[in-house]
Image (cartoon, grey):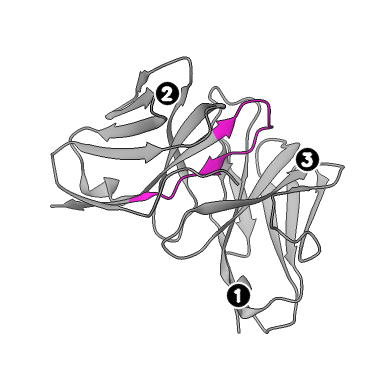
């Protein structure tokens, strides 16, 4: 089945630095990927839609200059948290859909836990 | 984003009993719904989906019911097992707005052996 891989799975960074998270579709091509953010014991909040070869579409309230998204190929989207602060500490999850899939379900990566100290 | 669900509720059931997890949505234009299961520290896993032209769909041990009149859907898990312990989310796609899904608050299910 469709597999989405995220890297790293866990990262600790100092306040003010930037962190890049990768999301890869391993056995299918994805023109669109989605980035979510999840705080402890809360739901997933859609941050942005990553579009291959074009600009990402951000949800209302999400700072595009803070969360840079690049979707340079059909199998890779990256999310860069710039000038990270402790309040950016969260679980970041990406998803993509295999167009060959029989159902419309999106496959999620295993998530990246970001801790900013 | 859209509002789906309210505060995170919890549900405890005895092993072998049936579980019913509920979800309310607010956008009447939502026409496709997915139930996901999320275990601690992992990404969500697809369980079952349903389109708005249906009111019931069954899978293996799971059934999803959709009531468009009151904007409510439920996930029924038959013969609940310890491995079913997780947080369950409903997610909605709004017609003609793209392929993005918005998640509900979630329900934490604990199965008591």
Q: Residue at x 75, y 74 (%)?
A: A18
Residue A96 on image: x %, y %: 64, 40
Nearer the viewer's eye, disc 3 or disc 1? Answer: 1
Specify start and end residues of the magenta stretch as a single range.
B93-107
Left or right, A14 with respect to B7, comes to: right
Q: Main secondary structure of the magenta part?
A: loop
Q: Quadrant of residue A83?
A: bottom right
Q: Which residue is under mark 3?
A: A74
Which residue is at the front of the view, B84 or A7?
Answer: B84
Q: Which residue is under mark 1?
A: A87
Left or right, B4 with respect to A21, comes to: left
Q: Which residue is under mark 2?
A: B68
In the structure shown, which secondary structural element does the residue marked by tag 3 occupy? loop
Left or right, A10 with respect to A47, comes to: left
Viewer can see residue A1:
no
User: Distance from label 3 to label 2 (Cα)?
Assistant: 36 Å
Q: Quadrant of residue B98?
A: top right
Nearer the viewer's eye, disc 2 or disc 1? Answer: 2
Which residue is at the front of the view, B88 or B83?
Answer: B88
């Amino acid at each position: 089945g469709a597999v989405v891989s995220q890297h790293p799975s866990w990262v600790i960074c100092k306040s003010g630095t930037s962190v890049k998270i990768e999301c890869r579709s391993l056995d299918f091509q994805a023109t669109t990927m989605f980035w979510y953010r999840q705080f402890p014991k809360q739901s997933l909040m859609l941050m942005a839609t990553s579009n291959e070869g074009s600009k990402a579409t951000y949800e209302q309230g999400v700072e595009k200059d803070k969360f840079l998204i690049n979707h340079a190929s059909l199998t890779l989207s990256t999310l860069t948290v710039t000038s990270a602060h402790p309040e950016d500490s969260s679980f970041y999850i990406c998803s993509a859909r295999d167009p060959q899939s029989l159902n419309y379900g999106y496959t999620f990566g295993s998530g990246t836990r970001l801790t900013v100290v | 984003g859209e509002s789906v669900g309210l505060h995170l509720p919890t549900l405890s059931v005895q092993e072998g009993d049936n579980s019913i997890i509920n979800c309310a949505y607010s956008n009447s234009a939502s026409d496709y719904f997915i139930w996901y299961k999320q275990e601690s520290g992992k990404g969500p896993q697809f369980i079952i989906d349903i389109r708005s032209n249906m009111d019931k769909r069954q899978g293996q041990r799971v059934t999803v019911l959709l009531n468009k009149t009151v904007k409510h859907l439920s996930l029924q898990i038959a013969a609940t097992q310890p491995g079913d312990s997780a947080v369950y989310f409903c997610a909605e796609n709004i017609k003609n707005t793209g392929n993005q899904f918005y998640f509900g608050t979630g329900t934490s299910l604990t199965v008591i052996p």
